[in-house]
Amino acid sequence: MKVLALILAALAGTASAAGCGPDKLNTSRTLTLKREGALYGTNQHAALPLAKGEVVLTFDDGPSPENTPLVLKALSDQCAKATFFMIGQQIAQNTELAKRVVREGHSAGIHSDTHPHLATLTVEQQLEDLKRSRAAYKEVFGIETPAYRFPFLEETPTLLAALKEANITVASIDLAINDWIPEDTTAILAERLKNSLDKAGSGIILMHDANGPTAKALPTLLQVLKDKGYKVVHLEWE
Ligand SMILES: [Zn+2]
């Protein structure tokens, strides 16, 4: 019976994979990074080793009970894997949702503990924020975070040194859709994505899973990527 159950489970896996045919955006490949204090994203640093037309989907500021489930649904519908940069306090308040993100095959890093303007804090306060967000991550996922994205992409020498010391990747971005305005419509966000893609041609895309308009627009945004022939690369860490 055990063998039969395994066979049935394998068949079920095949069936769901069959839903990820050429009509879907899909995930074209996985890029596994070393756990080292590298810095990526041409907004501030070196480019990831991506070919033209390859993009990495990243979502910041969650998990959000209102919006992250919609983002997960849109990604699942298109068989696309992403990386979520989560706020420590949001992880602590939404542990099940945080776990669900990773269970669905996405990767997760941290995005500070309280989303402060770090440069306005003392060195001690900055290190405390990092310590708390790392602890929140470890508590829920059982491992050290492999990656960090600075709130507002505002880097500080103190935290750059601390992240390097802890072998945590600093993930900046290559392009964005400036998705924080509550009145943004799906059409506006799609237009911004098209313009950003035309300019950058490849790279790490910053979006916000905690942002209502983004969650609502995501099916359309993923369709834009598919229609323009972009390939999704999933970031993971050793
Ligand atoms: Zn943020």
Image (cartoon, helix red, strand yellow):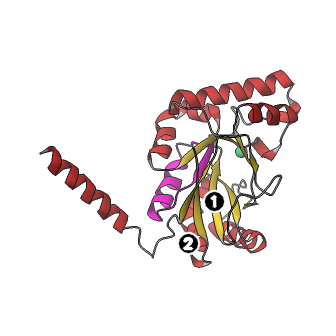
What residue is shown at x 31% (from left), y 57% (from top)?
A: 13
Ligand 1 is within 8 Å of the C-beta of the residue at disc 2: no
Badge 2 crowding class, 10 Å Cα cut-off, few under 14, some 14 to 19, many 20 or more, is some
Dot 1 amino acid type: Val
Task: Residue 132: name its quadrant.
Answer: top right
Residue 94: image location, x then y, percent: 52, 35
**Percent x, y of residue 154:** 83, 43
* Position of residue 145 measured from the top left corner of the image (x, y, whole percent): 61, 36
- The answer to whether residue 74 is magenta is yes
Displayed quadrant of residue 118: top right
Image quarter hosting the N terminus: top left
Where is residue 235 drawn, in percent x and y? 60, 53
Please report the residue visible at 45 percent of the width from the left and 59 percent of the height from the top. 76
Q: What residue is at 60 percent from the left and 73 percent from the top?
A: 224
Residue pushed farthest left? 1
Left or right, 74 with reference to 189? left
Apparent side of residue 93 relative to residue 198 in the rendered image (left or right): left
Ligand 1 is located in which of the four quadrants?
Answer: top right
- Residue bearing mark 1: 56
Count up the numbered dots: 2
The residue type indicated by label 2 comes to: Gln
Magenta residues span 62-85
Task: Name the residue nearer the viewer: 236 or 177.
Answer: 236
Quadrant where the C terminus lies? top right
Task: Choose the circle earlier in sequence order: 2 or 1.
Answer: 1
Residue that label 2 marks: 223
